[in-house]
Image (cartoon, grey):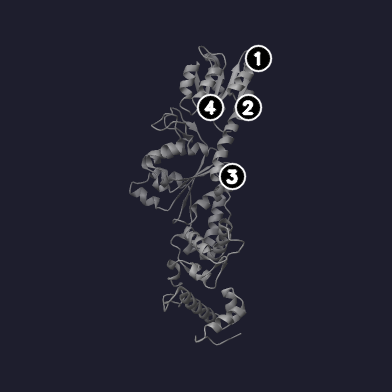
Amino acid sequence: MTSLQVLVVDDEPAIRQVVSAQLRKAGHTVDQAGDAESALERLSRGDVDIALSDIKLPNMSGIELLRKARAANIDTAFIMMTAFASVDTAIEAIKAGAADYMIKPLNHDELLHRLNKVGDLRGLRAENRVLRRLVMGANQEVFGFNSPAMREMEHMAAKVARTNSTVLITGESGTGKGVVARLIHQQSPRADRNFIPVNCGAIPENLVESEFFGHTKGAFTGADKIRKGLFLEADGGTIFLDEIGELPILLQVKLLHVIEQKAVRPVGSEQERPVDVRIIAATNRDLGEMVAQGKFREDLYFRLSVFHIHVPPLRERRQDLAALIKFLLQRNTRRMGSDGHEATLAPGVEELLVNYDWPGNVRELENILDRALILADRGHVTLADLPPSITKTSAPGSNIDLNVQLEGSLREQVRKFEAALILRTIEDAGGDRRAAAQKLNIGLSSLYRKLEEMDGHKLPPENE
């Protein structure tokens, strides 16, 4: 059950107190108002989810209160209550915009049922707004890892996913920390609730508190309407705080409070709202060193790092690269459109990509493949489609120097590189042309044709 902010409006103190006690016992946050004027003042803050209002009030009726709230663009759901049941009154209340209508004396179980029903409808509308924003990210395809390090990471993610523990994910920029966070959420009991990713470094410092915890209407200049806040958007689900090391010290204190008290206080509000959120944080910075320098709170660091997962860089998991390249090529081809042509790699391209160190990790790899697909003819990626930052680098362990004699036109340079690669592959295969052709992923006849074009090169003895 989601906790709601409820305002009980009734001119009889005993009724207000009894109903408020019942709602608090059920886990809701409750305020009271004895007349429509004070109720309207409280509603103007914009953080009340549901107003449970008597129709018969002094000076102004509950229905008139509802109309004034709607005229002021206050997005609070109203459940009207009255001791004098009549069809006309019910119709008038519904026409004015009431979500429901109840007869006094209120039945405790029925009240909670009606309240939760209205709350669920409000929550569903909010979730739909969030889902529309996140629909592209929520349908990410999943890559199956081959390297032992990443399989261990997957195992750890699956273990912690079943708990409510906070998780700290570390790793270099572009390693896929966000993918790991989403993987944890998708395997958790919260998988059917919201996953809210937040880039802590992308929010202006003066707006972080409002973005995180929300604000009431009029809380500050420019706050012309209520903002729910990212933590309340994620209520019942998971919030992913990326680049947590960029969070200002003042907000670190407030985040620690949220973790410990499981409640948030919107800017401009006098009351805290209970919130049930699983927190996953990520950073490419050394938080331990930041703690030593006084730039990150030690108590928050310990709270976040209850369970630590490190995502290794691509250069430390080369076993994943060949399959990851094919996976990204296929996915990006579908995403970008390729006129029906399947993405393929020319000889030497995969070897070159696998042996590159990838300082930008998966993000750099994906960007380079996107660029190559744009340049490629009919989806066939050649060495010429790769940027110079890749092709000018020699593959580790290889005696092919990509800078040697690479002069002339682009076509001539590509031909020379291809020739050097073919010669090296045949030499590594002990002269076995068939094995070399298989390694280069080309047909044997294609290899012989290329050898004929390389007239003048000294070939290793043939051994087939």
In the rendered image, is residue 161 in sight? no
The amino acid marked with disc number 1 is Ser
Which one is earlier in the sequence, the residue at label 2 or at label 3? 2
Instruction: Return the residue at label 2.
Output: 113
Instruction: Return the residue at label 1.
Output: 86
Report crowding for label 4: few under 14, some 14 to 19, many 20 or more residues within 10 A (C-alpha).
many
Disc 3 element? loop
163, above or below 173, in the image: above
The amino acid marked with disc number 2 is His
169, above or below 448, in the image: above
The amino acid marked with disc number 3 is Ala
Q: Quadrant of the C terminus?
A: bottom right
Instruction: Return the residue at label 4.
Output: 76
Instruction: Return the residue at label 3.
Output: 191
310, above or below 354, in the image: above
Residue 72 in the image: state x and y as whole percent: 49, 25
Separation of disc 2 and disc 3 at Cα? 25 Å
Separation of disc 3 and disc 1 at Cα? 44 Å
* Tags 2 and 4 touching, CB below 8 Å: no
Label total for image: 4
Separation of disc 2 and disc 1 at Cα? 22 Å
Which one is earlier in the sequence, the residue at label 2 or at label 4? 4
Task: Give the residue drawn at x 54%, y 49%.
Answer: 182
Which of discs 4 and 3 lies nearer the camera? The answer is 4
Residue 326 in the image: state x and y as whole percent: 57, 63
Residue 156: give its label.
none
Which one is earlier in the sequence, the residue at label 3 or at label 1? 1
